[in-house]
Each structure stands twice: as C-alpha cells, then as structure tokens.
Amino acid sequence: MKSIVLIGGSGIVGTALTKAWKDRYRMTVLDMREPQEEVAFIRTDATCFEALLSHVPRDTDVIINLLQVPSSNDVKQLDKMTDVFFKASVYIMEAAVKLSIPKVVFASSNHVTDYYERDGHSILGREIKVSDYPYSRGIYGILKLASENVGHMYAHSHPLSVINIRIGTVPKNEKQALQENERIHHTLLTREDLANLFASAVETTSRYGTYYGVSDNPDKPWSMEEAYRALDYASEVNSEDLQ
C-alpha cells in the first residue's frame, strides 16, 4: 500500500480523496486546519521549508500538493498568493528531492488557460488542449502555471516524477452547484472521476505530464485525450448522471 501525503488536504479536494481512498492508500494530511475525515494529521505550515522537511514522513511514496487560499487580482493579496501558489510549490519539490520521495502530484487549475473559456465553453471552436499557449486572465492562473514550470524543472533535473492536473470545478455540494450554476454542467469534475484521475496520476510511471481534470460532461471545454492516453484514465460519472 502506497504512502500518500496530502499537503493542504483538509479542503474540498483533499476531503474527497481521503474519503475515496481510505482502503486504497495510507494517507497523511499536512495542513493548518484539521481534516474532516479520520486520517493521520500533522499541523504544518507548507510555506515554511523547514516545517515541510521535519513533518513529511520519510516513508512517503507520493506528495500531493492541494494548497489553496482565496484568490483575486487584488495586489494586496499578492504576497499571500505567491507564498501559497508558488513558493510553497518550490519548497514541496525541494523537500521531495531532499527526502528521496519519488513523485509529486500538483493540483493545478483550469484557470491556467481561462482566457480561452467563457461560461464553461471553449471560444476556440474546439476543446482546449494542454498544447494551447497558457494565457490566463488572472494572477491565480499565472501562479499555477509558474508552479507547473517549477515541476518541469525539477522533473528534468532530479530523479523526481511530477504530474500536474488542471482541475475543473469541484464544488462542495455537486447537485446544488449544478442547480445554481450553468457553467458547472460543463466544467464539473465529479467525486468519482476526481478520485480515479488522481489515483491514475499516483500510479502512472510517466516522468512528467500535464493534464486537464474534467468529467466527460456535455460540451466540456477542455480536452481529456492526453489523460485518457497517458494515464489510462476514463471518466465514469459526469454532470448528466447527477441530475
């Protein structure tokens, strides 16, 4: 059984993964907040490199970076956003190398390319691909892209595998969100698909890759062909199945 560390694992995505994986992986959550699920927990400030080095268990097989804070284009939030969405990503990669942990999975965001998406639809006349130049409309997406590039640097200069998942929409309450927001009908990543996609990222032997994370919803804006092919992943539950 693989040992997984979920940094920032007390949020919506981390809670979904710890619930889905309780019989599949041995998990530890590192966060400033206590997790909702019953799981090993170490209170950790991931923006402190020394804290990461001392708190990440030495037998870890995979680190999953799920760090999240409220984001905006307000320059007053820039330092905090940079700490969480960029500096902590560097610290996590460096800690993985120093602790000889072989893989990091990074929860990136669809906002890396949100310039091409409007209200859940691609404006390109086709699904948005990872190969499309990553234009973002906000600082959040730009910082997520920077962390993806940090992962590329580490994966190609150290014995470290890095997998980036550009997550679609993962609401706290899926059915309620579908009733209230039309965009989510296209951008939803269901709980089942979230768990399966991240498990595919954990299990893949690929050294490096970037993939979108969205269920096979009607008129979804992002292409999943790369994930289907490289990660041997398939969507099982989409937004129509939940209505």
Image (tube, rainbow, N blue to C red):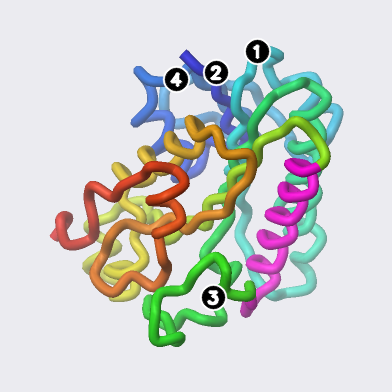
Q: Residue furthest right?
A: 50
Examine the rendered structure and indicate whether residue 185 appears above or below residue 117.
Answer: above
Residue 36 rendering spot, x and y as whole percentages: 44, 31
Labelled pair 2, 4 in contact (Cβ < 8 Å): yes
Residue underneath mark 2: 3
In front: 216, or 179? 216
| Mark 4 or mark 3: whose residue is earlier in sequence | 4
| Mark 1 or mark 4: whose residue is earlier in sequence | 4
Labelled pair 1, 4 in contact (Cβ < 8 Å): no
The verdict on residue 152 being magenta is: yes
Q: Residues within 10 Å of mark 1 (few under 14, many from 20)?
A: few
Residue underneath mark 3: 114
Residue underneath mark 1: 59
Q: How crowded is mark 2: few (under 14 residues within 10 Å), some or many (20 or more)?
A: some
Examine the rendered structure and indicate whether residue 113 appears above or below residue 172.
Answer: below
Q: How crowded is mark 3: few (under 14 residues within 10 Å), some or many (20 or more)?
A: some
| Mark 3 or mark 2: whose residue is earlier in sequence | 2
